Image (cartoon, rainbow, N blue to C red):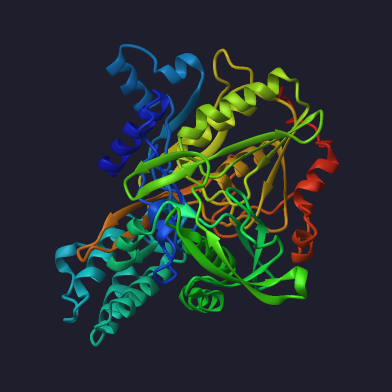
């Protein structure tokens, strides 16, 4: 068993359970050239276990938890009694003996028995040491010791040979990421030094609109979300942001993506990076104006500080954690939050308690655009919606399995009415874990135009010898029904077509459909 990793998870879980508000984590690394600011800022954040995030075939954000077993028993021994989680009924996660690892049912042989001393030297090249460091980290930490039937030692030599004549850093990292892409999983990406360092100097503001990739266009779906009017209407198609052409973002992202299935998500991640800026500055935005027959218009848009509590931790600086709620009608409440960070937990508890007090009959939980965050935060949030101990699934590491359970919190009344969850292609990581777990129990109905991102692996981030960053998966998530959102994502129960014209008209078809259903699907059988 990987003792340091196991101990790390244990310590982080204990921090969450005992209310340590210093523990935070977040989303993924993006592979689009230089446009990796948001992803890097959201990555490398220690949370309750490991990183989970939203970057197809390349992502991040942390996860973890524990159950009464060796870990809980150790906690009791150290504290002189049951943990506060067990005593108060706040959460639990179980740690099982080895046997649930990916290798257990794999037809491929384990490949982690190779002696590293026997490895042949790589061909001399400027970037050989970086490739070797990446390869060795994945060799030691990747959750699947069979490497998906990929001959990982052979890939080291193949890609090492391709670096012989490569001097350019960008080109070298393209080869390194191609090697990582051979494993075919998310949360596995290397970023060169200049991209990693650039993330810290971009600013904590952003242009005040939300963008989605719809039918090959960067469509503004929400405008003037905060600050003064931007002059860019909903339904506008962005063509250039500052000096960056949207067409170039698309071209580079498509070229770098290791999976066509996640290209749309990657493009939006890259666009979100470009929308970041220094508060008080302005940036030129070119767009097709739907109110002027799609004539190209240009506006200087002011960079605003987004609402929410600021979080700094590790590679993440100045992230705004925002929780929004309102009543949609007399019996239906709306709740949304932008990232799974611990500062949101208390606020979510407060809002849900208000809904319970007001005897709200139906809740719409909007997870669209939520890229993930602290993985173990799924436990206290799911506990707001269940009346008894409820398994949320498990994390399969290389040599052990970590199970996750939610249970209602002592002295708090959970919301037990129907819950409609709204998703899109940017719903990733912890958002997918929550959705998969609640869906497996029939506790929610999912609405959306597309499946979720399909990026739900716990991961860690480490600094490379040249100052670059490596994000690598150390486990996989399986829902309580055995399903895995990694890869294909989670398909909505109710698919609602969305077009640019809807945003031009000021409509939100997904929310409108959920509201029209009035949560008529009922609640989880047996709960309450």
Q: Is residue 186 visible?
A: no
Image quarter in which the N terminus is found: top left
- Residue 275 visible, this orientation: yes
Say above or below: 216 vs 477.
below
Nearest to the observer: residue 207 or residue 272: 207
Of the pair 440 and 339, the residue shown nearer to us: 339
**Residue at x 71%, y 51% (from the top left corner):** 492
Q: Quadrant of residue 9?
A: top left
The x, y position of residue 491, in whole percent, is: 68, 54
Vertical comparison of 405 with 163: above or below = above
Residue 302 image position (x, y, % from top left): 52, 58
Residue 69: image x %, image y %?
39, 26
218 shown above or below 515? below
Q: Quadrant of residue 66?
A: top left
Residue drawn 26% across and 40% down? 3
What x and y, as percent, mark residue 459?
39, 51
Q: Is residue 381 left or right of residue 499?
A: left
Which residue is painted at 61% across and 56% down in the image?
210
């Amino acid at each position: 068993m990987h003792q340091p990793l196991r101990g790390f998870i244990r310590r982080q879980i204990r921090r969450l359970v005992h209310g340590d508000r210093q523990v935070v984590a977040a989303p993924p690394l993006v592979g689009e050239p230089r446009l990796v600011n948001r992803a890097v800022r959201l990555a490398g954040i220690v949370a309750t276990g490991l990183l989970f995030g939203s970057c197809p075939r390349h992502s991040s954000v942390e996860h973890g938890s524990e159950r009464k077993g060796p870990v809980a028993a150790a906690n009791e021994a150290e504290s002189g009694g049951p943990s506060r989680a067990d005593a108060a009924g706040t959460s639990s996660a179980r740690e099982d003996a080895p046997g649930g690892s990916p290798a257990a049912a794999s037809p491929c042989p384990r490949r982690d028995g190779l002696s590293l001393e026997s490895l042949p030297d790589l061909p001399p090249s400027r970037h050989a040491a970086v490739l070797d460091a990446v390869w060795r980290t994945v060799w030691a930490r990747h959750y699947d010791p069979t490497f998906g039937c990929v001959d990982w030692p052979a890939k080291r030599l193949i890609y090492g040979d391709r670096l012989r004549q490569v001097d350019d850093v960008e080109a070298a990292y393209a080869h390194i990421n191609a090697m990582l892409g051979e494993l075919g999983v998310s949360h596995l990406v290397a970023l060169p030094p200049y991209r990693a360092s650039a993330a810290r100097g971009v600013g904590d503001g952003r242009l005040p609109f939300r963008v989605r990739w719809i039918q090959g266009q960067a469509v503004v779906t929400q405008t003037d979300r905060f600050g003064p009017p931007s002059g860019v209407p909903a339904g506008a198609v962005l063509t250039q942001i500052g000096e960056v052409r949207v067409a170039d973002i698309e071209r580079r992202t498509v070229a770098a993506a290791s999976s066509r299935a996640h290209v749309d998500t990657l493009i939006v991640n890259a666009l979100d990076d470009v929308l970041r800026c220094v508060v008080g500055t302005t940036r030129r935005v070119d767009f097709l104006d739907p109110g002027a027959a799609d004539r190209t218009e240009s506006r200087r848009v002011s960079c605003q500080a987004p609402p929410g509590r600021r979080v700094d931790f590790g590679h993440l600086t100045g992230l705004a954690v925002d929780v929004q709620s309102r009543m949609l009608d007399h019996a239906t409440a709306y709740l949304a939050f932008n990232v799974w960070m611990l500062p949101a937990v208390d606020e979510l508890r407060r809002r849900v308690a208000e809904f319970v007090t007001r005897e709200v009959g139906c809740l719409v939980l909007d997870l669209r655009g939520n890229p993930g965050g602290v993985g173990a935060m799924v436990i206290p949030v799911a506990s707001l919606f269940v009346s008894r101990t409820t398994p949320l699934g498990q994390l399969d590491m290389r040599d052990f399995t970590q199970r996750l359970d939610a249970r209602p919190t002592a002295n708090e009344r959970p919301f037990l009415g129907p819950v409609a969850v709204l998703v899109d292609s940017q719903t990733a990581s912890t958002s997918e874990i929550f959705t998969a777990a609640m869906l497996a129990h029939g506790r929610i109905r999912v609405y959306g135009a597309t499946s979720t991102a399909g990026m739900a692996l716990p991961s860690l981030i480490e600094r490379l010898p040249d100052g670059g960053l490596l994000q690598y998966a150390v486990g996989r998530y399986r829902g309580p029904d055995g399903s895995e959102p990694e890869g294909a994502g989670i398909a909505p129960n109710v698919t609602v077509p969305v077009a640019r014209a809807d945003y031009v008209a000021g409509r939100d078809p997904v929310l409108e459909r959920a509201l029209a259903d009035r949560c008529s699907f009922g609640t989880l059988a047996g709960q309450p």
